[in-house]
Amino acid sequence: MHIAWIGKKSPFCGNVTYSREITNALLDRGHQVSFLHFAQEESKPNNWPNCQEVSLPFIYKSQVYTIPTFKATKVLTDSLREIKPDIVHASLTLSPLDFVLPEICEELNLPLIATFHTPFAGKGAKLISGTQFLAYQLYAPFLGNYDRVIVFSQIQRELLARMGVREENIAVIPNGVDTTKYSPGTSKIKAEFAADRLFVYQGRIAPEKNVEPLLRAWKQSDMAVGSKLLMVGDGPLKSSLEPFYGSESGIIWLGFVADEERRIEILRGADVFILPSLVEGLSLSLLEAMSCGLACLATDVGADGEVLEKGAGVIVNTKTVRSQLRTLLPLFQDHPELTTLLGQKARKRVLERYTLSDNITHLVELYTSILAQRPVPLGRGA
């Protein structure tokens, strides 16, 4: 099967990781992939698939959204016409191209699937104002123009259905992690930072990630000298937070870590992973930490609470993050047997529900069912 994948290659975010992992896994299964993306040709992050690439021109891009040039629509249309894929899969990038893509694929008679990543607050909660709310409001009327829309949880499926997207048009395929690559193992990271107990946050340093309550709780908990909190990531709030929460409190700011092996080394050497977000989709960072056997604490937003339910981790209320962490941080510091047990349960949960292998199997089954529903024009590449 030949898949034309439309996604992000930079800057680093969950969408980028999703595109890289899925396309690599599809190639490993023997499928052909053409990757269309908003990135300069010289951009070559680690572990990207070796496949045909098409660079789409853009004016601006960020971790949140992308603004293409006027020429991008023609480049995309001409490229798909030349590639002649069996199916087009768009990992939606919050770009104006997302809205014209169904028309392009209809003109070329190509089946079209979308993955809708945009985070949300949680079950029964209102969407947070700003980008997330706008995205759901904008996209809901258009998602019905795709042959199928992939979301990561039943909660997100119900949310889109309430906003008018036909339920039969929505497929739930959770994020998956490579459990061989992200697995428990040896690490020298504790020795590097002179840590007896190591806690990790990994993600953007941005308002929706709610990191300041974590930092305040850490500082107010009077953690032991040998306990360290690694802040892995970058974002607009980093420069304003770092001066007030630093090494004197055992907080170490690593910034963005591009090297995947380094990120795995950090996770393997850590004891606890903390994600205090106000909104999420289904956090790949959380799944990666769980797969490496860390005890995980995360807020009940997006599908993250669903991932940790029934003992696979600790679910924190977004309204009481600081007060809950002030209790939990010392508890996890002083009771390594508790973090070991939770880490084992986290790893088991990922193996049961969130492996990349199962994700790809379900995805290929979806491709096959959609292709079976429509006649294949003569001359389509195989």
Image: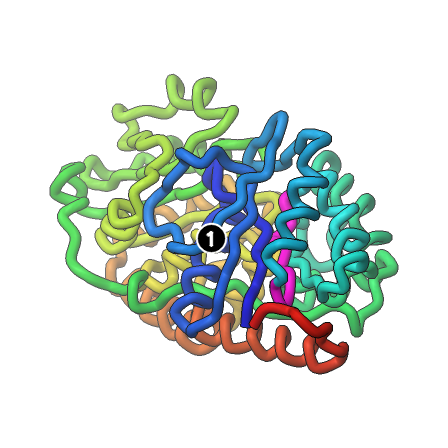
For residue 289, above or below residue 378 = above
Q: What is the number of callouts on the image?
A: 1
Quarter of the image with the N terminus is bottom right
Residue 92 falls inside the magenta stretch? yes
Element marked by disc 1: strand
The percent position of residue 344, horizontal first and vertical second, equals 32, 70
Image point 38% across, 17% down: which residue?
A: 243
The percent position of residue 31, horizontal first and vertical second, equals 47, 70
Left or right placement of residue 104 versus residue 241 in this view: right
Q: Which residues are magenta?
A: 85-93
The percent position of residue 298, horizontal first and vertical second, equals 49, 53
Residue 91 falls inside the magenta stretch? yes
- Front residue of 60/308: it is 60
Can residue 128 be seen? no
Q: Which residue is mark 1?
A: 52
Image point 67% across, 37% down: which residue?
A: 72
Q: Which color scheme does this rendered protein use?
A: rainbow
Q: Which residue type carries mark 1?
A: Gln
Quadrant location of residue 153?
bottom right
For residue 257, above or below residue 360 = above
Quarter of the image with the C terminus is bottom right
Image point 75% across, 57% down: which residue?
A: 105
How many residues crowd around disc 1 within 10 Å: few (fewer than 14), some, or many (20 or more)?
few
Quadrant location of residue 89?
bottom right
Image point 76% across, 64% down: which residue?
A: 109
Can residue 345 be seen? yes
Residue at the far front: name it.
379
- Front residue of 163/211: it is 163
